[in-house]
Amino acid sequence: MKSTAKRNRVRVYLALVLILLAGFLLSSIYIVGAAPAYQSTEEGKLIFESQCISCHTIGGGRLVGPDLNGIADRRETDWILRFIIEPDRMIAEGDADAAALLAEYNNLAMPNLNLTQTQAEAVFAYISSQSGAGQAQAQPVALPEGNTQRGLSLFVGEMGFENDGVACVACHTVGRVSAYGGGSLGPDLTHVYERYGEAGLASSLGGLPFPTMQGIYRDHPLSPQEQADLLAFFSWSDAQATEIPADQFTTTFWIWGLAGAAALFLIMAIFWMRQRHSISETLRSTS
Amino acid sequence: MNVRAHISMLFHLDKCIGCHTCSVACKNLWTDRKGAEYMWWNNVETRPGTGYPTQWENQDHYQGGWKRMKNGLQLRIHSRTKGILKLFFNPALPDLEDYYDPFTFRYEDLFNSPAGDDQPTAIPISMITEKPIDIETGPNWDDDLGGSTIYAENDPNLKDVPQEVREQLGELERLVFNYLPRICNHCLNPSCVAACPSEAIYKRGEDGVVLVNENKCRAWRMCVAACPYKKVYYNWSSGKSEKCILCFPRLESGQAPACAHSCVGRIRYMGVLLYDADRIPDAADVDDENLVAAQREIILNPFDPEVIAAAKANGIDDGWIESAQNSPAYKFVKEWELALPLRPEFRTMVMMYYIPPLSPVVSVIEKDLVKLDLSEEMHDFEVFHRLEAARLPTEYLASLFSGGNVEIIRKVLRKMLAVRVYMRRKSVEGEVDQVALDALEKAELTEAEAEAIYKLTTIPTLDERFVLPPYHREMSIEAEGMDPLAHKGETGVGYLQVPMRGE
């Protein structure tokens, strides 16, 4: 008798827990569903200041990319949203306006920032709200005097970045910066100074807004002095160096690689002759 | 005088029949494990032959043992400085080919093969890779000089034998071989202990057994290279070195080691020897010819009151001293000077001793008949009578057992022959004549000694062959705070710690 009562009580508890759980799940679905599709301008501000501000201003004049003041009046909302989300595809598809913009801005295509529809809407909302106010632009940090030689050292990694960032040479190359050139993952930076202009480049070095670089340098930003040094270096390279296509290094690499392998095999051959043979095998093979 | 006790084994080679029972007993007890398949802590070699591993005595190749330098002995494998520099480069190791690729046969093929025109066969497979192999060699591939002549011809001990005699050894009517059972020699001056960079090998204080502490072993394998007898083996599975432990768990419970206990020919004797540890460095650092004498010199007389007092001062108890007094090892090694160390010129001062074998006289071919080379004036038939006509050259035995000193071998063989002649006269012909007495005198033996040698050689009881000292393990248990009665009848006391690879 006693055990039956106990079992019943357990069942009641179980049912209660189940109902509570179900209720919690349902309410969470409702909350998610009821969330407004339109993000607040607060989120838009965050995104703009972290990802757009290196190249764009709102009422601050053109930088690397166009001034976005009053953009909503100049273009259609759908076009703007799509360009924020996938500029690369629009250019590739040959959108006339996009192509014109590309030509106007030194053929520097806006990178795909991997923003969602909601995020793009938030950014757009922020830009619209700020249009006319003329506040949102990168506050130009007064950079100290740059040193070309130090910039070169930083670029090739002879000198480490203060915040442990990866040396530029891992992904980029500049002229004949090292025997086999630099990395070829990122673009050749020999004439980046010319392409971005001094203000644009300085602003880019500050935030490094490119999608690939963002993850790498988020926790390792460049210090003002380093930015200035690199800027000086890029200015020098733009004037002095010439771009060298990556495949020109391939032949050198093969020659040295094969020569090294041959040398190693030669050393091995010397020791191969002198290797120890087991007595047992020697006895059997010589008799 | 620093008196210590050592438990020693004697091999009476004249009695060995080469049945390998010792090897099998040892294998079943200790090395029937993964990674130990190729190891034979006890093996029996046919001599002349190359042994196991192949030509283990060839120290130009294996770099084992000690060499004499201006300021004392030095390991042949490397000096101290070189040892550190070459810590990660240790090439003087035997190849698996030099041991052998351990094999078994795929017996299930005999039952599972599909029906066919031929009888199914069990093909040989490697015990390491478990893949089919061609068996090329084994630990006793040249057993009884079978198979091929290359092994006998390449015995390193034939180096000092005149070329003419070497050629004769290959002739069918002059063929001769003897057996050489080998275990770890538990040396007084062990080069494996000296070479170990991890200090994992040690010589036990109470009885001199050389052991590997597998918890300290770090697989440098310097011991494998440094041991001139190649009796330290590397277990490829556990990553630790292993060697003969002289069956110490059996010794501690009063039994002879498995190899000795199972010996069919009853060739093995065991007993305690007392020695002077302070004189080891000097005794190991003399000319090759004097090594045997020097080693005999440091073995002490257990009846000498001075030795007994010094032994007691060193903590050797009465039971061990009494055991040393009854020891067959003492009688054969020191009293009768019949037992000799194996290859003493490696200077590790081995504590296992061998009584060299006698061999029949050579035969000659006369009128197309094979005839024993006996002189005309010999009236009584004694095949073993003349040393100079013995089939096993004395130079050969000298290379094995006396560092090249032929005189020592002649002396031993003369004694053994004298005992034979004397006892033959006495027990077969019933009368001791002048010939027998002359033989004894020439061998520097008395009639009583001859009688004693005969008795211990031919009709010893188990207790006379194995005079094992009392280890008093019950006392050690008590010292550990355990109840000895709770462990009565158990073999071995301690904690089983399974060693981990790389630790």
Image: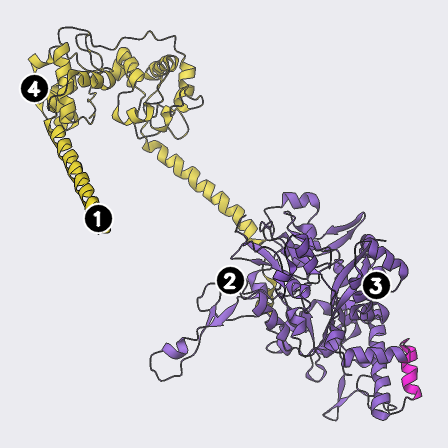
On the picture, is B131 further left or further right than A202?
right
Residue at 19% across / 43% down in the picture? Answer: A14
Question: Mark 2–mark 4 contact, CB under 8 Å?
Answer: no
Q: Chain of mark 2?
A: B
**Pointer 2 residue:** B34
Depth check: give the residue in front, A131 or A202.
Answer: A131
Q: Chain of mark 3?
A: B
Gap in angstroms between the C-alphas marked 2 and 4: 76 Å
Which label belongs to residue A7?
A: 1
Type of the residue with mark 1 = Arg
Circle nearer the viewer, 4 or 1: 1
* In the rendered image, residues at marks 2 and 4 fall on the same chain: no
Magenta span contains residue A160:
no
Q: Residues within 10 Å of mark 4 (few under 14, many from 20)?
A: some
Gap in angstroms between the C-alphas marked 2 and 3: 41 Å
Which label belongs to residue B335?
A: none
Gap in angstroms between the C-alphas marked 4 and 1: 64 Å
* In the rendered image, residues at marks 4 and 1 fall on the same chain: yes
Depth check: give the residue in front, A58 or A91.
Answer: A58
Circle nearer the viewer, 2 or 4: 2
Question: Mark 3–mark 4 contact, CB under 8 Å?
Answer: no
Q: Chain of mark 1?
A: A
Q: Chain of mark 4?
A: A
Image quarter of residue A257: top left
Q: Which residues are magenta?
A: B432-447
Mark 3, secondary structure of its residue: helix
Which label belongs to residue B296?
A: 3
**Pointer 4 residue:** A77
Chain B shade: purple
Type of the residue with mark 2 = Lys
Gap in angstroms between the C-alphas marked 3 and 1: 89 Å
Residue at 71% across / 63% down in the picture? Answer: B185
